[in-house]
Amino acid sequence: MNTQFLLDIHFLQIDMVEIKQFADLLKTIDMAMLTDIWGGKNTYYINYKKT
C-alpha cells in the first residue's frame, strides 16, 4: 500500500504484542481506527494477559 501521499496518517502494521514501542506516537493521536485479524499462537496472550 502506497501511503506517501497521506501526510498526517500513520499506518502501524504490527502485532499488538509490539504496541509498546509506539507509546510516544500513540499519545499524539486524536483518532484511531483499529483493524485486526485474530488468531495464531498469541491470541490468548493478547486477549487475556495483556488486557
Image: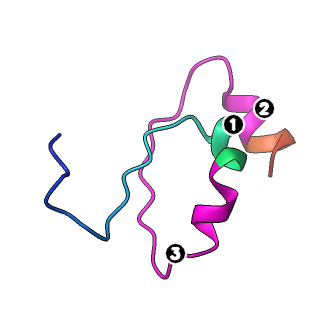
Which residue is pictured at 58% across the width and 63% down the height? 25
Q: Is residue 48 above or below residue 26?
A: above
Give the secondary structure at mark 3. Answer: loop
Q: Position of residue 36 (x, y in %)?
A: 45, 44
Which residue is pictured at 43% across the width and 40% down the height? 13
Q: Position of residue 18 (x, y in %)?
A: 66, 37
Give the secondary structure at mark 1. Answer: helix
Which residue is pictured at 66% across the width and 63% down the height? 24
Q: Which mark is residue 29?
A: 3
Quick one: quadrant of the N terminus? top left
Q: Amino acid at mark 1?
A: Val
Q: Amino acid at mark 3?
A: Ile
Q: Is residue 42 above or below residue 50?
A: above
Mark 1 or 2: in front is: 1
Which region of the structure is painted magenta?
A: 22-46
Mark 1 or 3: in front is: 3
Reading the chain from its start, which is encountered first: label 2 or label 3?
3
State how far apart marks 1 and 2 are (Cα): 9 Å
The local crowd at label 1, few if under 14, some if 14 to 19, many if 20 or more residues have their Cα within 10 Å, is few
Reading the chain from its start, which is encountered first: label 1 or label 3?
1
Q: Which mark is residue 17?
A: 1
Residue under label 2, please give it: 45
Residue sitting nearer the eye, 13 or 44: 13
- Residue 23 is a magenta residue: yes
Which residue is pictured at 20% across the width and 63% down the height? 6
